[in-house]
Image (cartoon, coloured by chain):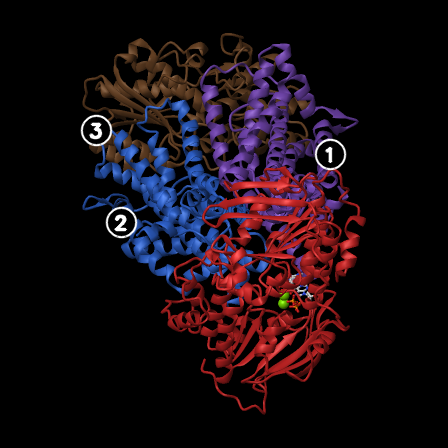
Amino acid sequence: MLRTVSIDSLMPYIGVVLLVIAGSFFFPQVLSAGYLSQQLQIAAFLGLLATGATIVILLGHIDLSVPWVLTGAAILSTALVGSGNPVLSAIAVPAALAFGALIGIVNGIGVAILRIPSMVWTLAVNSMLLGLAVLNTGGFNPRGEASPLMIAMASGDILGLPISFLIWIALSIALAGFLTRTPFGRYLRSIGFNEKATFLSGVSTPSVVFTAFAIAGMCSALGGVMLAGYANQAYQSMGDPFLLPTIAAVVIGGTSILGGRGGLFGTIGGALFITLLTSILSVMQIEDAWRNIIFGTIILVMLLFQTLRKGAAA
Amino acid sequence: MVSIMSDNSTPLLEMRGISKHFGATKALDRVDFTCNAGEVHAVLGENGAGKSTLMKLIAGVLQPTHGQLRVDGQDVFLNTPQTALRHGLVCMFQELSLVPDLTVRENLLLGAPGAGLGWLAGTGLDKAQDVLNRIGAGQIKMGTRVADLTLPQRQQVEIAKAIMKKPRLLILDEATSALSASVVEGVFDLVREERDSGTAILFISHRFHEIEALADRVSVFRNGQRVETFMKGDHTYSEIIGMMVGQKIEELFPPKPPSQRDADIVLDVQNYTWESQVRDVSLSVKRGQIVGLGGLDGQGQGAFLMGLFGLLRKAEGTTAISGQATEINSPKEAKKRDISLAYIPEDRKTEGLILDQSIQENLELAALGRPDLDAGDTALYAGSLDQLALKHGGLELPVSSLSGGNQQKVVLAKWLALKPRCLLLADPTRGIDVKTKTQIYAILRKLADQGTAIILLSTDYEELIQLCDETHIFFDGKVVASLNGDDLTPENIIAATLNVASEPQAAHA
Amino acid sequence: YRPECFAPAPGTSTISYDAKDGPYKLAFVNGFAGNDWRIQAIQSAKAWAARPENADKIDEFTVVSVGNDSAAQIAAIDNFIAAGYDAITFIAVNPTAFEPVIRRAERAGTVLVPFDNVLDTDKVVQINESQMELGALKAQTVMDILGGEADKILMVNGLPGNATDRDRRLGMMSVLEQVDGLEIVEVVGNWDTGTSQKVVADALATHGEFDAVVSQHGSAGSINAMQAAGHPIVPMGVDGENGVRMLMSDLGIPGVSASQAPAMSAIALEAAVALLEGNELPQTVFLPIPQVNAADLEAGVNFFPDLPKSFNTGTGFVECFEPFTPQELLGQSPDNT
Amino acid sequence: MLDYMRSNRREVIAGVVLIALLAAYLGSHPRGASTYVMTIWANQCLILGLAACAQFFAVVVRGIDLSVGAVMALTNCVASYLLDGSAVGIAVGMLAVVATGALCGLLNGMIVVYGRIQPIVVTLATASIFVGIALLLRPTPGGAVNYDLADAMTLDLLGIPTALIITVVAVIGFWLPFRRTGLGLGLYALGSSEQAAFQSGIDTRFIRLAAFTLAGLFGGLAGLFYSFVTTTGDAGIAAGFTLNSIAAVVLGGVLLRGGVGSLIGALAGAFILKTIASLMFFSGIPSLAQPLFEGMILAAAIAIGGADVLRARNKLEVFS
Ligand SMILES: Nc1ncnc2c1ncn2[C@@H]1O[C@H](COP(=O)(O)OP(=O)(O)OP(=O)(O)O)[C@@H](O)[C@H]1O
Ligand SMILES: Nc1ncnc2c1ncn2[C@@H]1O[C@H](COP(=O)(O)OP(=O)(O)OP(=O)(O)O)[C@@H](O)[C@H]1O
Ligand SMILES: [Mg+2]
Ligand SMILES: [Mg+2]
């Protein structure tokens, strides 16, 4: 984890602090434990998606299939639980994760074998998943239901800390360890910088790509499961609001969109920042037009800070 | 830009107290340097001596940290290549300035004199064309994508492109590093002509016979400083090397041990064929043997080497490692313990290294995949690094901060960590200075003595003769001559590369 | 043709065309397909077409979804005009983009019937519920329950920039602005359950308790958020999703569940046929708003615990025809067009 | 000819795919290949086509523009104010609309060049800003565009769809000459190898600025034509177009790594994408199955482009 801590990755944390302070001027309650822990809980959903996205972006790719992997996983898990069959409800979460991994592999095949740019291939996969979901809902659609486990994962808390947040952080730490302590992590970054040289060093680059996309898929799926737990239901296109914030969270966290550079520590900050920003803009009842403008501007400012700092360093 | 014959009293280009720092590295340190019209001024120095940096300053690609440049006695500030061009300072860059996805024609037009952002008239193309013809590149079609050209062809285009700009000062930074002897001659004639018409030439090369052939004056650089400047012939070959490396180099090539016939065969390839580029090639390498692959560029030797490393699909023929017939379908398989081949690719910057990562990380990348090795263990590399005397400011620095010679050492060390049974090298000494070369030759020979089998592809026939126990010359995908012992002479090699099999020796190929 | 089905909007004109004899070629041009309401609208339309009394009036019935792109929707409508269809119903992606295509339809003698998201035009018959009224109804109900007195009310809006959202909001405002000293807190739920839950949670955390909540589509999120925050049960005006009504009856939330019914896709077809048969219809039809007061919630009647929560309970309008049974809708296998 | 086909393999493939799809569409259409049908088809194709052109200029310099849709939304809203009234007023209005687009592009370019931030990230942020401004202009859809003008632009001229004429003009009148200018060449050089371009004495900053400005300009044109088709302003149109424009350029054989491809390819890709969608109308595919089919055809079309890597005999070829 520490290896991935850079000044850039600290930027969003500073941003978070500033936001909280600024927000507390308008609403003192922003400083309340209730509000803050709530933000942690909600940030976890975005955070899980961003965690997966970070892995793929480190690889030098991008995954646009997040929204409907998320939705698909949610529909699948709630359907299994809704079936009322104890066995099926027990495997609901694992099944959803498997679904995510599977889609991840499909993404990986297009990218690593057919060499299709991830940006369009994952987009196509996304629209196929949408098609599947529509088709499924159109046919016999079982009564969906979130299992107590899913609800606990999304809304429960341990000593005041939201479980969703704990899951997210635990996963991030685990993955960060995985990225820094295993060859896989090294291969990931190396491919992000220079896939050819990595391949020539005797690395089976396709399998690295598969693994990365599979992990990302599972993260999206987990996000879907927990969102289903949160809303206690699954519904069409519940993932659509998450795509762009996910990417924003990753880059604000200092991960280079070109691949190779960055890490999960920054992404955590990025997800927290984006969540808090949206929340504060929302509770301040700022008109939608201005929310868009402010949101975009703040992101730009953060990024400009990053380059300014580099300029100063160089 | 018409080239005025400036009288020799005021030098065409004058540099005063020039320093260039990259963070900690002092690429150039208070250098004074002048260059007169109508002379070929050779610049010598080992890798990282600062030659290219100096040239990049003249070409306006880099700006000096301190110091002043003068053209015709006038102070100038070359903030961009355009400004340099306006003064007639043209550089033929070492890492070429050709755009891969554009055609040869488009590349020649790019930044050609008078070519602005508007409509491109295509002036000067014919000039470029006859330059190409003269340096034996007539067959290059104007319509081909540069990406589809071989490295030598690109260098030829780059030369044409430079000359097309009617330079007053022409810089050739390792312009000929990949060109075969015959082509080089054509280039030299051209350069001499330019010189005689009053152009100043700055010439960088690591090949002494080229300096010998072309230079009027010579400047030697070491560690970012100009050691000395003198007329060619004022100093002997070994004196110059002494200046370059700051110490004497006794023998460029290590002595060849008598080849032992009975050593067992490590790698044996039979009837290797791929597409139309490699045709029915059979050869084998014994323990402790260094086998050379020669020939003009693109005759199949490069592809053959790739094939051995499992980079070619649908290749025919059989490969046996120490008697074991084996299928090698990927680098991953090739580096497995029971096969343990290593391949040093031709282009270290894009294929051998990950420039943005640290030296350490690059060293580890190959060993990581080997369960029997602990890639993190620095002892794995220490040996070869000492032997190669890697010049670096810390293993955690990006490998890009090394000059090419040192980058090449990293590529070697990275693979030597796997203690490969058979080492495949694709022109490992291109653009590498003498000292580094000797270090590389020494370590290759040592490895051989320790039992490693080595296949060395080289464009430098000195290496094929002095270093290799046996040399196979490729022509049009086939091995047209296999030379060893006394047959291993320049004449035979040149004859074979041009496939004029007049010499009797070539018979038993 | 049942006139009572097509209640005229106040002050609207009437429209009729020369009768054509059937059977007719009908098309339904949907916009975005990826949400439950739209899917159910498609299913309702197909269920309607499948009913025998309608089936024999229909020669062909085609449904397409074109995504959130009015240009694509215009193209689709043009395509069916070109293909000689008699009538085309559609959910307009944009209320003002269809003037030219309406003119082309007139020339070709094709009947257009927009519904749900309708047009700012008086040239064609439009089928919808009064969005103003829908908003007003929710607000009025909660205010009545509160006896007309309230200090602070939470209003969860829909998709910004959408005309329907605008009208519903105005409807709510028309009531709430009458209440003096009332603080209205607005958040944007995007008609999305998850988003609604998030923004309501934030609003509760920062604004404390509310006397009532009025919410557009996605109300389940609002209720979840209030539960999570331990907010006391207060009167609510919510949408008609199955899951919402379940929560309402489980938690005993007072108020009203009123919804835009996907079944109106069938009414639009009904209207199209009526027009083709030469009947005169109001230019703007305001369907009665399917609404259930919390008190009258009854499992299996107006909500269905064994169906998906995202199922929309608005399965029909009694004035027009026997509402569809859920089986009739969900049983619709996707492979009969 | 064969040579041309070999060197422009990608465009050729795209062309063939397009023709096949179009044939299938016209074949399935009860009305067949009539002017009306062709006009409908061409109109919506051209909208995405112009968006794809915008995307192309960003991509060819190794960038990407996630604000294409947003620029369209903004310019569409601007147009809904300016494209009604006197002939002169309308003419000026059209210029203003396109200028707005170009300005957005210039802004993107400046942040990319002087802020040294990755284009994808910059445009992600500016897109949000542009949409915000569009929403300020049109909180809900509205406004009007002069119908006669709209008809003139979206119907046909002597039986030939105006949209197709515009397309041809864009290619022959703009692209083919432009490709032979220093600027045109510079775009490719920059995208293919920035260092080489720089060392060849090209002003890389200017070229990049120009590229993004052109991207914005074509985004503006797309927004303008969208206004002609829908005759109204709507801030909510952004979503669909950005990602589709990327898919379109890739379908058209433009490499996202920059330096390869052409405006013609981008247009072809866009037309392919829209034809796939139109294919659904009379395909007889069950309505709820259509999205899935659409997705699968898209995936297939993309895969065709990628298929030839499987034929690569040298494993290093596929890296780039
Ligand atoms: N852009 C740069 N950033 C950091 N260090 C650099 C840069 N360019 C050159 N150097 C360093 O400056 C020194 C001189 O490099 P230079 O390229 O001039 O050597 P050279 O004489 O050209 O070597 P070669 O003979 O291999 O071409 C080297 O140590 C190199 O690592
Ligand atoms: N931005 C940079 N940062 C760090 N090192 C750099 C940078 N730019 C160039 N270098 C390195 O400094 C050296 C500059 O010397 P040059 O570019 O001449 O390479 P070189 O030693 O000549 O390579 P070769 O031997 O392959 O020709 C190169 O090795 C280059 O990789
Ligand atoms: Mg150099
Ligand atoms: Mg060199």
User: Within 10 angstroms of label 2, few (less than 14), some, or many (20 or more) residues?
Assistant: some
Asked whether residue C129 is in view, the answer is no
Q: Which chain, by letter, is brown?
A: C
Q: Nearer the viewer, residue B202 or A277?
A: B202
Q: Which mark is residue A174?
A: 1
Write down which chain is painted blue. Answer: D
Residue labelled 1 has its Cβ within 8 Å of some atom of ligand 2: no
Of marks 3 and 2, the one in the foreground: 2
Q: Where is mark 2, residue-wise?
A: D165
**Residue D23 in picture, x, y percent from top left:** 28, 35
Tell me the subunit letter for badge 2: D
**Which label was assigned to residue C109?**
3
Residue B142, located in which quarter of the rendered image? bottom left
Q: Residue at x 44, y 71 (%)?
A: B112
Residue at 35% from the left image edge and 11% from the top image edge: C321
Query: Foreground residue, D1 or D205?
Result: D1
Amino acid under disc 1: Ala
Label 1 and label 3: CA atoms lie apart by 66 Å
Q: Quadrant of residue B201 in the image?
A: bottom right
Q: Is mark 3 within 8 Å of ligand 2?
A: no
Disc 3 packing (10 Å; few <14; some 14–19; many ≥20): some
- Read off the chain for label 3: C
A132 shown above or below D278:
above
Q: Nearest to the eye among marks 1 and 2: give it.
A: 1
What chain is colored purple? A
Q: Position of residue A86 (x, y in %)?
A: 64, 10
Q: Is residue C305 above or below residue C135?
A: above
Q: Nearer the viewer, residue B163 or D244?
A: B163
